[in-house]
Image (cartoon, grey):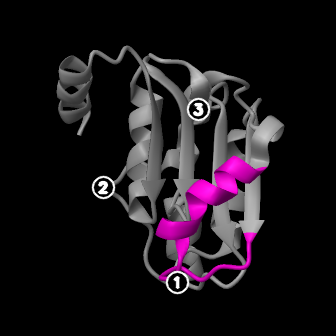
């Protein structure tokens, strides 16, 4: 994934990026953000960002061969981030995002809770929810920079 990002940056001429991940892609985006130096911010949408809490919530054994984003606190703590979670999401319950934020204690992080389920209708709605935050974004003008 990281080499794919490098290639996209090369093609577009971008110097930095904001990573967005939905569902299991939230874990991928968070782990990439922890590993890279060019990430300005992290956004997750119904993201599985605490694998331990998710496995426990669903009665599954703990993941032994996966990097849990919630254990990347030292790297992610300083990164501006927004996590969207849904009250009606039974796949990635609200407590997954809450657990992640409690574990990493971000300096500039925000949890946005909406009345959404997992399958409908995050892909269409999250950009609108992000725009609605306006001045409340935890990264200031990072979204408007042309990098």
Disc 2 is placed on an element classified as loop
- Residue 31 got which mark? none
Q: Secondary structure at mark 1?
A: loop
* Circle 3 residue: 76
At 17% from the left and 26% from the top, the residue drawn is 7
CA–CA distance in space, label 1 to label 2? 18 Å
Is residue 132 left or right of 74 when viewed as pictured?
A: right
Q: Is residue 129 magenta?
A: yes
Q: Residues within 10 Å of mark 3 (few under 14, many from 20)?
A: many
**Separation of marks 1 and 3 at Cα, in angstroms:** 25 Å
- Return the residue nearer the eye: 49 or 65: 49
Residue at image mark 2: 65
| Earlier-in-chain disc, 3 versus 2 | 2
Residue 58's disc is 1
Q: Could you tell me which quadrant the N terminus lies in?
A: top left
Please state the extent of the stretch shown in magenta in the rendering.
Answer: 114-132
The first of marks 1 and 2 along the sequence is 1
Vertical relation: 6 (above or below) 45: above
Can residue 137 be seen in the rendering of this structure?
yes
């Amino acid at each position: 994934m990281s080499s794919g990002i490098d290639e996209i940056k090369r093609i577009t001429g971008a110097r930095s990026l904001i990573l967005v991940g939905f569902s299991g892609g939230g874990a991928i985006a968070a782990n990439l953000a922890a590993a890279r130096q060019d990430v300005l911010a992290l956004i997750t949408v119904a993201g599985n960002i605490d694998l331990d809490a998710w496995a426990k919530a669903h009665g599954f054994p703990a993941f032994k061969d996966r990097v849990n984003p919630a254990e990347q606190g030292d790297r992610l703590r300083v990164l501006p981030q927004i996590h969207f979670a849904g009250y009606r999401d039974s796949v990635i319950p609200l407590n997954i995002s809450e657990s992640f934020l409690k574990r990493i204690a971000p300096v500039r992080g925000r949890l946005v809770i909406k009345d959404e389920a997992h399958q409908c209708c995050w892909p269409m709605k999250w950009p609108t929810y992000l725009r609605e935050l306006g001045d409340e974004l935890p990264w200031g003008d990072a979204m408007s920079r042309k990098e």
